[in-house]
């Protein structure tokens, strides 16, 4: 869809404003259908609290988030619909309630999929309701009568941490999806300097290929979401589907940033999270490890770790992070990004972060201390036993 932005007018703007009013982000103005400065400010506030890119425009992802935000738990009956599942803030609230009661719905992503329906069915059986997997008034009443079952920490955090502990510290046999951003006609950030031309898509793929080789040498099964040249761009939902269908243990999406201000520089890493406290705890840990390893090994400016609800991070069923490795629009970052040796450093930092993910927290090692070359030796030794 074409982004709806400031100075636009019409029914779409009126609907956007009505949702923002219902969320208490905008004062009601009867009949208003103009995208003014106040509306733009409200959109920015919504994007910030939902972990979206803050640009004040309503593109496809922001519209889907607005459409989902209009629902409150109890406003409608919830059920598993194929192929178009119900999506909304009410679904996310239901998932969080089920997680608090000890039912495994995976991540609270706001999508009423088969896992959520199965958890609802389990709850209905336990309290003597008709076990049909849908959530109507009787099921809601049953949930209100019961308190939390899970104690000792956030339920999903306990499950995620336990899964990593059980998988062991060795990388051999684990599956990772490496996602080079953009591709096809979508080149991302592009900078031309004289006869030289660099694109985010090319640099991201080169980094992904370097990372693929090192992770494969360490014994991991590595899948890339695209090749060096793709006739068509791969959408974030398609990249998500690839990772989920493979059943990957981790996903790392690689990008290069750009900004109108040439002074903008540095590396930033993102994990799934929203402004209301929902987060992927293991994804947050991976993001922190990625950020620290890259900063220490390369000296790039530390732009820190941030929570976002981008679809690639929200819809994947495994811990996922996106890393923006420097600004192509920064002369200093660009000089480094175009050097193969620097991209090797970034790839080694990512391998070290992945390895540290599988170490128990109490046995973790200092940032920058892992010699990535020894990981191959460990795999070789394992293969001969």
Image (spheres, grey):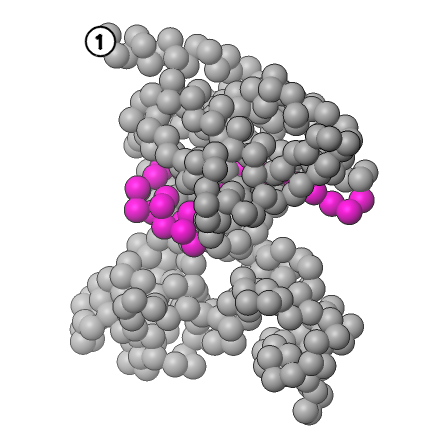
Q: Position of residue 203 (x, y in %)?
A: 58, 32
57 to 365, vertically: above or below: below
118 to 106, vertically: above or below: below
Q: Which residue is mark 1?
A: 385
Q: Position of residue 343 (x, y in %)?
A: 59, 23
Q: Is residue 343 left or right of residue 263?
A: left
Is residue 210 highlighted in magenta?
no
Residue in view at x 48 percent, y 34 percent: 228
Q: Is residue 216 left or right of residue 307?
A: left
Badge 1 crowding class, 10 Å Cα cut-off, few under 14, some 14 to 19, many 20 or more, is few
Q: Say which element carries label 1.
A: loop
Q: Is residue 297 left or right of residue 106?
A: right
Name the quadrant containing residue 108: bottom left
Q: Is residue 337 left or right of residue 177?
A: right
Q: Position of residue 328 (x, y in %)?
A: 69, 36
Residue in view at x 47 percent, y 76 percent: 72
Residue in view at x 49 percent, y 30 percent: 208
Residues rendered magenta in the picture: 236-261
* Residue 206 or residue 130, whichever sits in front: 206
Name the quadrant containing residue 91: bottom left
Instruction: State the residue lying farthest toward the bottom.
Output: 30
């Amino acid at each position: 869809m074409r982004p709806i932005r400031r100075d636009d007018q019409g029914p779409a703007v009126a609907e956007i404003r009505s949702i923002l009013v219902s969320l208490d982000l905008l004062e009601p103005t009867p009949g208003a259908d103009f995208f003014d400065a106040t509306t733009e400010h409200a959109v920015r506030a919504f994007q910030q609290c939902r972990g979206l890119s803050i640009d004040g425009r309503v593109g496809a992802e922001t519209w889907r988030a607005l459409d989902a935000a209009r629902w409150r738990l109890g406003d409608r009956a919830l059920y598993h619909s194929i192929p178009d599942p119900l999506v909304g803030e009410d679904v996310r609230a239901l998932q969080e309630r089920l997680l608090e009661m000890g039912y495994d719905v995976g991540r609270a992503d706001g999508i009423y999929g088969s896992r959520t329906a199965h958890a609802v069915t389990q709850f209905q059986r336990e309290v003597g309701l008709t076990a049909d997997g849908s959530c109507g008034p009787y099921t809601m009443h049953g949930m209100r009568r019961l308190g939390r079952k899970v104690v000792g920490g956030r339920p999903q955090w306990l499950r995620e941490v336990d899964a990593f502990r059980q998988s062991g510290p060795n990388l051999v046999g684990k599956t990772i999806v490496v996602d080079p951003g953009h591709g096809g006609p979508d080149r991302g950030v592009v900078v031309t300097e004289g006869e030289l031309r660099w694109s985010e898509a090319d640099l991201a793929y080169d980094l992904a290929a370097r990372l693929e080789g090192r992770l494969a040498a360490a014994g991991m099964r590595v899948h890339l979401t695209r090749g060096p040249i793709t006739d068509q761009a791969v959408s974030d939902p398609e990249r998500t589907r690839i990772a989920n269908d493979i059943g990957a243990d981790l996903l790392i999406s690689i990008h290069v940033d750009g900004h109108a201000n040439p002074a903008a520089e540095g590396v930033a890493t993102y994990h799934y999270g929203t402004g209301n406290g929902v987060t992927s705890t293991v994804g947050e840990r991976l993001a922190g490890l990625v950020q620290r390893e890259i900063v220490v090994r390369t000296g790039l400016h530390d732009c820190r770790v941030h929570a976002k609800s981008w679809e690639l991070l929200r819809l994947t069923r495994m811990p996922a992070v996106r890393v923006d490795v420097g600004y192509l629009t920064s002369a200093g970052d660009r000089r480094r990004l175009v050097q193969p040796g620097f991209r090797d450093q970034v790839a080694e930092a990512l391998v070290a972060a992945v390895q540290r993910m599988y170490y128990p927290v109490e046995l973790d090692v200092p940032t920058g201390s892992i010699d990535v070359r020894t990981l191959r030796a460990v795999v070789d030794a394992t293969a001969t036993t």
